[in-house]
Amino acid sequence: MEHDVDVCIIGTGPGGYVAAIRAAQLGLKVAVVEREDLGGVCLNRGCIPTKAMLRSAELMETIQHAADFGILVDNVRLDFAKVNARRDKVVKQLVGGIGGLLQSQGVQVVKGSGRLAERGKVTVTGATEATINAKNVVIATGSLPARVPIAGADGANIIDSDGALALREVPPSMLVIGGGAVGSEWANIFAAFGTKVTLVEMLPTLLPLEDEDMGKTLERSFTRKGITVHTEAKLEEIADGDDGKKVGTLTLKNGQQERISADSVLIGVGRKPNTEGLALDGLGIETDRRGFIDIDEHLRTNVPNVYAIGDVTGKQLLAHLASHQGITAVEIIAGEDKTMDYKVVPSCTYTHPEVASVGLSEKRAREQGYDVRVGKFPFSASGRAMTYGETDGLVKVVAEGKYGELLGVHIIGPTASDMIPEAALGIRLEATLDDIIGTIHPHPTLSESVMEAAWAAAGGAIHLPKPRARS
């Protein structure tokens, strides 16, 4: 079977399928190649299934505190099989939805593994044997969990994020390695389901890519939930215990060693590019030292008419960034003058409380030489957060000193991911503190806290006591 198209997209994750739809809208003839299910890792084994489970975890935590709201609930139990069934139903529905969208746009879906046979030609093997002659190729194959160089990390009951989704029973205890977004979300899920969780992070705070106030606040929240958190700790090895459990040996920040026994070990550290079988070397496509594909600001590789988007580029491994890259790439292919701007990419972690940020952290802003103004507003002072029953967390605004230009906004608290777009738009439009303050925010809402944090950076939040003068 042979196809002639304007654009062939290899991979149908949130980068690939969105790129395909946009390309078709622009009048291009499009084919996508997918060897597994539509939607890629994000939909099938990442963003969506974990968020479905996090919602179950959030409900469990809320119901356990229902009496605080005047609601008496007895005999609260977890049905883990139904949690998984609901998750799988959501995934199945969304996969079918993507198929319908691609079909409605006239996109050809070719099942199988794509290989860059030569310039302008993709061969497909597996479920379908085909050759696709393409004027342009977009590589959107995503990433995979990376293996960690730790002794004993390949044994039984040692899982990654994919393995966590395959569990059919809740383990009584779990050691989670990695306090980034993946590890923190899984720690939150299983702790809510009754697992005794120990979370280990090598760097000084959880969520080390975030502003340090976010990681410190999340650690305090996790500790109150009963999660044992070790930061600045290194996992040395994993061994088999006499009781059939796994034993992880840690070197703690004080230099002492501690042995942690757990029924399961979840390794949530790092991802690698999913490029095996693409034959990048055959075309001479350049990669960095980690194996991620090098691209310029127009998403182009060093080979003409070959583009790359999403996790496989190693920029920021975020689904929404992949989608934006995909749209930008095909608009460039269609002749539009577009470039990528990575300074306003929001980052979200869907723990309970959520964490969301955009722009520069306080530390990064100071490192770049800015005269920095910082404002913080705790959700404990928010009327809406109090009525919501969720007062953990804060909003932190980082601004440039002279003109008050918004440099970064960092939120940990309820619905943080839904509040961050205001900040992303503000930074993109070079908004100032006065712009945020001068925008009327509805009351009572959680979003008022962004305005209050801007007030704090400008000189004083309305709903916080005046700071005492230092003697």
Image: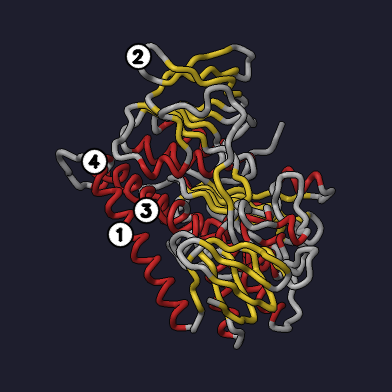
Please name the amino acid that badge 3 sits on: Ala
Mark closer to the chain start, 3 or 4: 3
Image quarter for residue 252? top right
**Mark 1 or mark 4, which is nearer to you?**
1
Residue 435, x across and y down, in percent:
66, 68
Report the Cα–Cα distance between label 1 and label 2.
37 Å
Q: Nearer the viewer, residue 137 or 294?
A: 137
For this view, does 169 lie left or right of residue 259?
left
Q: Secondary structure at mark 3?
A: helix
Residue 143, x across and y down, in percent:
58, 51
**Mark 3 or mark 1, which is nearer to you?**
1
Image quarter for residue 162? top left
Please name the amino acid that badge 4 sits on: Leu
In the image, which disc is placed on residue 52? 3
Residue 398, x across and y down, in percent:
69, 52
* Residue where numbered disc 2 is placed: 243
Mark closer to the chain start, 1 or 4: 4
Report the Cα–Cα distance between label 4 and label 2.
26 Å
Q: Secondary structure at mark 1?
A: helix
Q: Are marks 3 and 1 in contact (CB under 8 Å)?
A: no
In the image, which disc is placed on residue 89? 1
Q: Nearer the viewer, residue 389 or 437?
A: 389
Report the Cα–Cα distance between label 1 and label 4.
18 Å
Mark closer to the chain start, 1 or 2: 1
* Residue where numbered disc 4 is placed: 78
Query: Could you tell me which residue is drawn at 62 percent across and 46 percent down?
Result: 272
Query: Could you tell me which residue is drawn at 37 percent across and 26 percent down?
Result: 173
Q: Outermost residue toward the left?
A: 74
